[in-house]
Image (cartoon, helix red, strand yellow):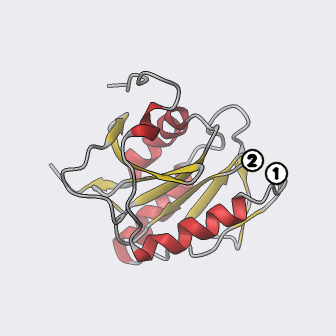
Amino acid sequence: MRAVRPAGRNAPHRLARPTGLAVPTALFVLTALIAGGCGSGPGTLRVGGVAQPTGADRTACVRLADTLPRSLGHHLGHRAISPATTFAAAWGNPPVVLSCGVVGVAASYRPTAALAVVDGVGWFAEQLGGSVRYSTPTRRPQVVVLVPGGVDSFDVLTSLAPAVNADTRPTTP
């Protein structure tokens, strides 16, 4: 079943207000925001603190990297990242940045938290300054996507849903 666009262009942004980040995910988030928020051109994007999953999570993230779309929509074409890694991807300028195999959940996440379900994938949303951090705390490996302000989150999450559904597994019934 296909998701229906919520009221308002960026409605998923209004789901949750963060109270903080879990330490393991904060490094990736802050590094990607700093790297992406400096007005760099559409060339290679420098990222740091990318997850390094092991075992089954590593295998799933490699599969995910192979099935991610080349574009997430208008002006959101795939970008090279540095250092090159299978566990992160970027699109557009300002960049949408995805990381696979992220350990830990957002400090504000609770098992009873409302998730924005887009095409079968539940996303937990947190406002981080001018960006929104979406994570899949009920899937393994966990996927985190940073969406800058001004980018339509619904279109991004809809574009990513087929790959995330195919290559990660739900941890809840």
- Rendering quarter of residue 136: bottom left
**SS of the residue under disc 1:** loop
What's the amino acid at mark 2? Asn
The Cα–Cα distance between marks 1 and 2, rounded to whole angstroms, is: 6 Å
From the viewer's perspective, tell me whether residue 67 is left or right of residue 91. left
**SS of the residue under disc 2:** loop
Q: Find residue 132 and report its horizontal and vertical position in percent.
A: 51, 49
Which mark identifies residue 108? none
Contact between marks 1 and 2 (CB within 8 A): the answer is yes
- Rendering quarter of residue 168: bottom left
Q: Is residue 86 visible?
A: no
From the viewer's perspective, tell me whether residue 156 is left or right of residue 162. right
Q: Find residue 157 and report its horizontal and vertical position in percent.
A: 48, 40
- For label 1, the residue is 42
What's the amino acid at mark 1? Pro
- For label 2, the residue is 93
Residue drawn at point x = 50 percent, y = 64 percent: 62
Q: Is residue 27 above or below residue 39?
A: below
